[in-house]
């Protein structure tokens, strides 16, 4: 209610739907009807994460974003432990590697994937025992942050890099603006960006606060 009041939107802008993430159509969520999908540490606990990601991509508008707060691991989970970790709703027990997560997102139809705010974390007590076995934190190391997947077209091979200038727009605008852990934009300063980052900035909700400059190099 507090967030709704701050947004200035009325209650008619809110609705609820019940369904499975692997079949959002059955819940009445139409193609290209959503601007941003926010998921908090549950995507990997779905029965079929790949199908859920494909559904999220389907319902997003062109230029839409999946904002997924999650854990990533430094090595793949033991398949023998996954089903028990899912049963326990244990997000660390099913954490994917960075490569696995990015691959799933791109296969689902997302043209660009970024990571933001990832920091190392210690395994919680809930993963000390899975399937009756001792869970050794030394076997897998974890980090926590946000995976951002954008529904934009992937740039063609050979597309040139450009510069991007962040306008800031308002007095309380974030400065610098962080698109990812590796991409930061101080207000007013031209920053070289890859063709893929240029596609994100030009085709998402950030288009109004960025000016793309001349091409500066070839990829």
Image: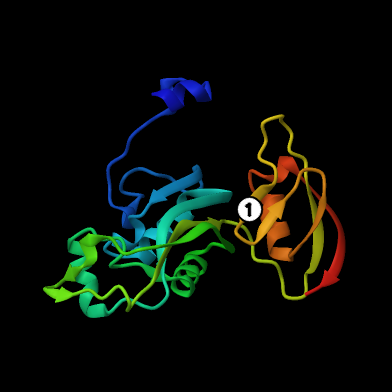
Q: Name the side, left or right, on which 56 lies relative to 212.
A: left
Query: Can residue 9 be seen by looking at this rendering?
Result: no
As drawn, 167 above or below 114: above
Q: Position of residue 200 (x, y in %)?
A: 66, 55
Q: Tell me the quadrant of the picture where the N terminus can be found.
A: top left
Provide the residue designation for mark 1: 179
- Compare residues 104 and 6 and report the one nearer the observer: 6
Going 69% across and 60% down the picture, which residue do you hit? 197
Neighbourhood count class around disc 1 (C-alpha, 10 Å): few under 14, some 14–19, many 20 upward: some
Q: Name the side, left or right, on which 178 lies relative to 163.
A: left
Q: Position of residue 64 (x, y in %)?
A: 56, 49
Residue 126: which quarter of the image? Answer: bottom left
Residue occupying the far left of the picture: 132
Going 50% across and 23% down the picture, which residue do you hit? 6
Q: Tell me the quadrant of the picture where the C terminus can be found.
A: bottom right
Going 41% across and 57% down the picture, which residue do you hit? 70
- Compare residues 28 and 164 and report the one nearer the observer: 164
Q: Position of residue 101 (x, y in %)?
A: 45, 68
Q: Name the side, left or right, on which 212 lies relative to 47.
A: right
Going 34% across and 62% down the picture, which residue do you hit? 44
**Figure disc tally:** 1
| SS at badge 1 | strand
As drawn, 141 above or below 175: below
Query: Can residue 21 be seen by looking at this rendering?
Result: yes
Residue 156: which quarter of the image? Answer: bottom right
Identify the colour scheme used. rainbow
């Amino acid at each position: 209610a507090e967030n709704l009041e701050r947004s200035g939107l009325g209650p008619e802008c809110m609705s609820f739907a019940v369904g499975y993430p692997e079949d959002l159509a059955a819940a009445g969520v139409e193609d290209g009807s959503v601007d941003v999908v926010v998921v908090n540490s549950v995507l990997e606990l779905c029965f079929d994460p790949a199908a859920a990601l494909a559904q999220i991509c389907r319902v997003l508008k062109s230029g839409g974003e999946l904002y997924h707060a999650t854990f990533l691991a430094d090595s793949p989970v033991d398949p023998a432990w996954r089903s028990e970790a899912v049963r326990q709703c244990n997000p660390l027990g099913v954490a994917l590697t960075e490569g696995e997560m990015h691959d799933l997102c791109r296969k689902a139809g997302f043209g660009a994937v970024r990571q933001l705010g990832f920091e190392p974390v210690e395994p919680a007590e809930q993963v000390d025992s899975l399937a009756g076995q001792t869970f050794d934190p030394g076997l897998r190391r974890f980090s926590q942050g946000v995976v951002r997947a954008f529904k934009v077209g992937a740039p063609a091979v050979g597309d040139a890099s450009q510069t991007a200038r962040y306008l800031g727009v308002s007095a309380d605008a974030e400065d610098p603006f962080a698109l990812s852990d590796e991409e930061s934009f101080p207000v007013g300063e031209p920053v070289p960006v890859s063709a893929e980052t240029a596609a994100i900035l030009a085709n998402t909700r950030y288009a109004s606060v960025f000016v793309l400059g001349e091409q500066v190099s070839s990829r």
